[in-house]
Image: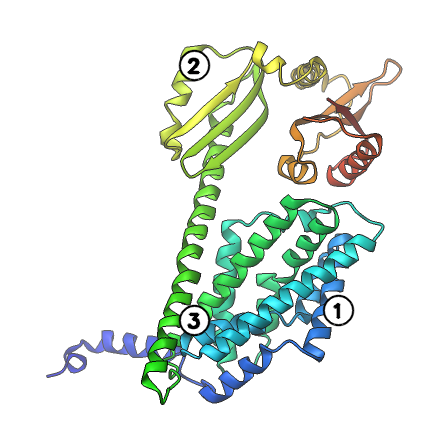
Amino acid sequence: MNRKSSEPRFIRLVRLTIERRFNLHVEKADEREVINAIRKNSEFKGANLWTLIFAIFIASIGLNVNSTAVIIGAMLISPLMGPIMGIGLGMGISDFDLLKKGGRNLLIATVISIITSTVYFWLTPLHEAQSELISRTTPSVWDVFIAFFGGLAGIVAGTRQEKSNVIPGVAIATALMPPLCTAGFGLANGNIFYFLGAIYLYFINSVFICIATFLIVRFLKFRKRHFEDMQYGKKVSRYILIITTITIVPSIYLAYRIVDKSIFENNAQKFVREEFNFKNTQVVNKNFLYQPDKKEIHLLLIGEDLKQNTLHSITEKLDNYGLHNTQLVIKQGLNAKQEIDLSQIKASILEDVFKKDSTDRQAQTPPAPYLKHLPDISAELKALYPNFRYYAASDMVFHRGDTVSGDTITVVVASFAKGLKSDERKKMEKWLKSRLPNDSIKVIFQ
């Protein structure tokens, strides 16, 4: 009696239902057609090349004017998915020629894309980095997942008899083009951090789309290329194995680093939010430093100094938040004054006083203007200004003697290792007005 006949009827029905519903071999296109289609899309010449250049210009304009709709349109036009899927397919069927073709064309497309975007950002009169562009300078764990699952969806759609709109959706989700345009922006403006961060994000996306393609091709059992010369076939297989190993092993390590960093930062945010909730002491600046062998949380406190036994008790709770082997560095009192000026301390104290008094005054005076939640822009400032040290921002309500209402002004204190020039200060003030939810902004430079 075989295994299937010995299964209970219910379990056998469930198994057959799952196999029928999730069977990727159903409606699978002819392997030769799939391979020829991907091989054709891997080529960058003629119309494909010009389409790529036009799409790069469109994406660069979208990033320059901070238009999400324009960026999405450019990604729909982009043919960058072709050579990446060609590399994955070449590895999956041991087709060394397709692998070389995909790699060569991907390199050509990458170089041309960076040159095109560099030319645009060198010529454009708008040189400020918008939020859409800044978000493409630092890969996160979500970028890894999106690239991997997007690659899975792309190759599955590519192996179907009837083509659907999955491929354009994958092109939008995996976002290969914006990082290349951001790299061009970094070159055009001499910002090496933008360039390296964007290329890193582009590499992560490309590698995991390639890995996803390879896995689906092997799962669908595509026939490997047959070689008449057995020795040459073994040589090709050996090259494929080496390239696959070189591609997958580092990418797994990079993905682990990104995931570990994201977990660390989330845990650190939760730790600071829950453990440093004191009535007379505030965290005015926080900075999380991540290295594989060194993790640090730097906090700048103002207000009533915390006692050493309190700090020791808080430090012992790091393990409860998954922050093992993490060093907590706290500056307060005299140490804090070396990092922030007196005006910043006064601003925080005034804000505390206002919040404390507002409850008593609500019955007598109209409510004070709503204080907007200010986003954390430290990473953006660091990317825009490499000499950036720290900043503090707070909404303050200024009351005049002749009125009962108040004016809300966002006060920003920013410190730089080297002083900013007059035009750089004006650009920063203009950027802050568009970035923060208040047009009335006062910037104090240190």
Residue 226: percent from left, percent from top: 37, 87
How are the residues colored?
Answer: rainbow
Rendered view: 34 above or below 375: below
Q: Which residue is located at x 68 percent, y 77 percent? A: 48
Identify the mark at residue 214; answer none if there is no mark: 3
Rendered view: 239 above or below 124: below
Amino acid residing under circle 2: Thr
Residue in the foreground of this view, choosing between 258 and 347: 258
Q: Mark 1, mark 2: which one is toward the viewer?
A: 1
Query: Is residue 95 among what the camera can see?
Result: yes
Q: Earlier in the sequence, mark 2 or mark 3?
A: 3
Identify the mark at residue 310; answer none if there is no mark: 2
Q: Earlier in the sequence, mark 1 or mark 3?
A: 1
Residue in the foreground of this view, choosing between 368 and 37: 37
Q: Earlier in the sequence, mark 1 or mark 2?
A: 1
Q: Residues within 10 Å of mark 1 (few under 14, many from 20)?
A: some
What residue does disc 1 label? 54
